[in-house]
């Protein structure tokens, strides 16, 4: 069993991005600029945005943070998004999800200029991904594909089971895995799938993106399979200062001995999601997607 180290891989990618940013600045260009809109004070969102700002500093990006309280009116938020859309000094921005219930998330996503949609959630970017055109790919699937490539994991002709069908991870993941550059045969499974355990056990590559802690158990994994655990659910813990810890969708201790490769939680997919946002922002700054 080999551990897929997302933390080390993301560190290497950050170094590559910083080298490219340094070259751009040396050539007289401004550094890439990433902004984040944060609504409210959700603990997880606060932490994630703080990490994004730190990541930007490490690679030489400019970063901006726009804050709103939980009770911000939807039209005020949409006005700010339109303002950022028109800012020529801003390459990309994200609106941190989830949003308060009174705000229509899909309307927010569709208001973002696709050319600055570095989260890859806009329908235009999703559509371009589906038909294989250059696009901003959703950060988590982007990061997983990068891990598979950098660990030289064979994907061509392999049976990949994606457990989870969210628009953020499961659906785009299945699309990317079936494209010609990857060539896997993909099955998308979910909570209503019949014989789900048997299906999972048939996978050469199992991608667990349910958000259900400990769902994937030892008997659901084929000997020698590659297991990618996307789950990052906060569960109470008396062993940490914060009072919680992150738990994946896979019971790591049971499953790991059967795997050829497996991602841990934390330290697997999470760091790659963050660094993929930087990669998308660099692409936006260079005009490589919508040229």
Image (cartoon, grey):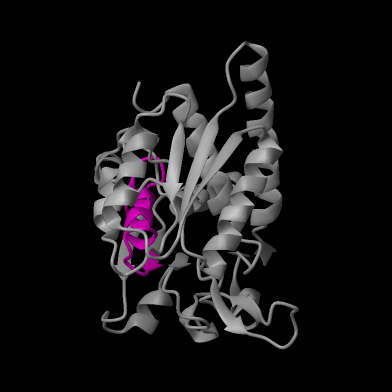
**In which quadrant of the rendered view does residue 130 lie?**
top left
Task: Decide whether residue 178 is among the magenta residues.
Answer: yes
Res. 155 visible in picture: no
Horizontal arrangement in the rendering, residue 243 relative to residue 92 (left or right):
right
Q: Is residue 118 above or below residue 39?
A: above
Q: Nearer the viewer, residue 152 or 191?
A: 191
Q: Is residue 225 above or below residue 214?
A: above
Horizontal arrangement in the rendering, residue 8 relative to residue 40 (left or right):
right
Where is residue 93 drawn, in percent x and y?
Answer: 44, 41
Q: Nearer the viewer, residue 98 or 164?
A: 98
Where is residue 223 drawn, in percent x and y?
Answer: 55, 74
Q: Is residue 182 above or below residue 286?
A: below
Task: Decide whether residue 177 is among the magenta residues.
Answer: yes
Horizontal arrangement in the rendering, residue 51 relative to residue 281 (left or right):
right
Q: Is residue 196 above or below residue 159?
A: below
Q: Residue at x 38, y 63 (%)?
A: 99
- Tell me the quadrant of the picture where the C terminus can be found: top left
- Tell me the quadrant of the picture where the N terminus can be found: bottom right
Res. 186 visible in picture: yes
Where is residue 69 drawn, in percent x and y?
Answer: 45, 61
Residue range in magenta is 161-183
Q: Residue at x 56, y 69 (%)?
A: 43
Where is residue 157 drawn, in percent x and y?
Answer: 39, 53
**In which quadrant of the rendered view does residue 22 lie?**
top right
Q: Nearer the viewer, residue 15 or 162?
A: 15
Q: Residue at x 56, y 50 (%)?
A: 274
Q: Residue at x 52, y 31 (%)?
A: 282
């Amino acid at each position: 069993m080999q551990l897929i180290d997302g933390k080390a891989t993301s560190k290497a990618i950050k170094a590559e991005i910083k080298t490219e940013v340094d070259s751009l600045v040396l050539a007289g260009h401004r550094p890439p600029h990433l902004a984040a809109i944060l609504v409210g004070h959700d603990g997880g969102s606060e932490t994630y945005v703080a990490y994004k700002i730190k990541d930007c500093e490490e690679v030489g990006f400019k970063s901006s943070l726009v804050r709103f309280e939980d009770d911000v009116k939807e039209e005020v938020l949409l006005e700010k998004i339109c303002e950022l859309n028109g800012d020529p000094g801003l390459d990309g921005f994200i609106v941190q999800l989830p949003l308060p219930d009174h705000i229509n998330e899909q309307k927010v996503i569709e208001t973002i200029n696709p050319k600055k949609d570095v989260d890859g959630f806009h329908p235009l970017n999703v559509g371009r991904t589906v038909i294989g055109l250059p696009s901003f790919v959703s950060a988590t699937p982007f990061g997983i594909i990068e891990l598979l490539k950098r660990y030289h994991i064979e994907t061509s002709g392999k049976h990949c089971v994606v457990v989870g069908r969210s628009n953020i991870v499961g659906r785009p993941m299945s699309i990317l895995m079936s494209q010609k550059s990857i060539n896997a045969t993909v099955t998308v499974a979910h909570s209503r799938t019949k014989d789900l355990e048997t299906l999972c056990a048939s996978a050469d590559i199992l991608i667990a993106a349910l958000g259900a802690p400990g769902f994937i158990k030892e008997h659901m994994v084929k000997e020698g399979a590659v297991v990618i655990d996307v789950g990052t659910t906060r569960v109470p813990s008396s062993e940490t200062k914060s009072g919680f810890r992150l738990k994946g969708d896979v019971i790591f201790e049971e499953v790991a001995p059967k795997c050829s490769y497996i991602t841990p939680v934390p330290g697997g997919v999470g760091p790659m999601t963050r660094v993929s946002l930087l990669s998308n922002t660099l692409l936006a700054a260079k005009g490589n997607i919508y040229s």
